[in-house]
Amino acid sequence: MSRSLNPKHWFSDGVFRAIVRNASYLGSGKLMGALLGLIALACAGRGLTPALFGTLVIVHSYANGVGALVKFQTWQFIVRYGTPAFGRGAIDELKDVTGFAFGLDLASGLIGMAGGMILLPFLGEWLSIPAADMNLALFYCTLIPTMTAATPTGILRVLDRFDQIALQQLVTPILRAVGGLISYFGHLGFPGFVLTWYVGDLAGDLCLWAMSVVELRRRGIRGALRPGLMGPGKRIAGAWDFVWTTNFAHSIWAAWGPVSNLIVGALLGPASAGLFKIAATFFDSASKPADLLSRSFYPEIMRLDPSSRHPWQLAIRSALMSGAMGFVILLVVILGGEPVIAAVFGKRYLAAYDLLQLMTASLIVTMASFPLESLLYMAGRQRAALFAQGAAAAGYAVLLFVLIHLFGVTGAGLAYVGGVMLNALFMLIPTWDAYRKRASLSHEPVQEAPA
């Protein structure tokens, strides 16, 4: 492993160069998107009272949280099964994979939208959503089907079109920023900001679908988006096990942010939810490099033999690079977070900086541990990933309720740090075990013969 720890040799590896290149594509879009997103948040923060800004956050978090709970990680399924099929030129297998993923997206999105709209009137008072704003909140739930769809992202990753994904990442923040400025200077109030966020999310999701359709046609792949569940599910070995396991794992973990906002809002009120949202947004922006590396890392290692040392060495290199970036970002956030929050949102939101300082304590761990989940999926240990994320989320939930009661909104920040630490620890244990037993791992998923 000594060679993997020597940075001089890292870029001699073509796969590592591909990981960094694709992450750079995504990073270029995310950086601009983060800046534009900050403008959108600033307009909402300054154009609304803290209570109304918190209500906007809660409405968005509710739809996003419901989507996260019902969402299947179809992009991971497509990468896991579609990458080797596409590499072999087995287009019919690839179409089975994408059709199955599309069917899951449709079913889960519609179920999530119906469930979310039915439950919201009963949860409105607990979530501190005023009765006058309930219709807007219900309208926002119609975004859930597009929020849950990950098929186009998986298709573009298998086809190595990270540049397209980078462009798409700008659509939502641009529209939110423009709409936010119009709502702020036009004094459109709460309905204007709700509509702005709605249109931005919808346009961004539809743009991703359009890009995947165009790319499939350019490659001459027809019928890849014909939805199907039972037929493809029988032909693809382990399909249902993979999607259910990753669904539960990511439903738990992806709901972390939105559900945290909801719990903070329910226990401490909309104003505290707004503060927590600002701090979480800054933290998420700071940790984006790890997310981008993960999105690039997973497709690349799926092209490698998991029984060899190569993907594991790539993980070490990527983790070290990401951890070093995390340390630099940590310093920047600590030094520059307070003046940025004061300038963008106003001094009444400066309490968010105290939360941000707490949350950045876990930044290096978050960034250095990003390869763990991908390695577990590569090794066929998705159930171990589910257990790790479930246990960490359960621990986080307990910490969140206990520490909020003890320390208020500061306790929410402490709980966030604890949850991140638990997730990294619980992921590391099965990953180390998978590495020790890597000689028994198969090279690629097997496609069952048609019945």
Image (tube, helix red, strand yellow):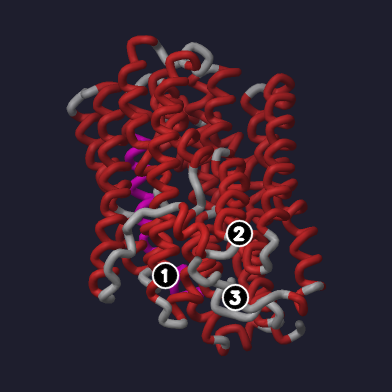
Residue projecting furthest to the front: 451
Residue drawn at (62%, 47%) of the image: 249
The quarter of the picture where residue 385 lies is bottom right
Marks counted in the figure total: 3
For the residues labelled 1 and 2, the Cα–Cα distance comes to: 37 Å
Asked if 257 appears above or below 238 in the picture, the reply is above
Does residue 77 appear anywhere in the picture? Answer: yes
Q: Amino acid at mark 3?
A: Glu
Residue 29 part of the magenta segment:
yes
The one of 312 and 323 positioned closer to us in this rendering: 312
Image side of residue 36 versus residue 89, left or right: left
For the residues labelled 3 and 1, the Cα–Cα distance comes to: 14 Å
Q: Residue 276: x percent and y percent?
A: 54, 31
- Determine contact: label 3, label 1, CB under 8 Å: no
Q: Amino acid at mark 2?
A: Gly
Q: Residue 410: x percent and y percent?
A: 65, 29
Q: Residue 390: x percent and y percent?
A: 69, 43
Asked if 242 appears above or below 11 in the picture, the reply is above
Query: Circle 2 is placed at which residue position?
Result: 326
On residue 94, which mark appears? Answer: 1
* Mark 2 residue crowding within 10 angstroms, few (<14) / some (14–19) / many (20+): many
Residue drawn at (76%, 52%) of the image: 426
Q: Earlier in the sequence, mark 1 or mark 2?
A: 1
User: Which residues make up the magenta segment?
Assistant: 19-42
Q: Circle 3 — which element? A: loop
Q: Amino acid at mark 1?
A: Leu
The one of 6 and 21 positioned closer to us in this rendering: 21
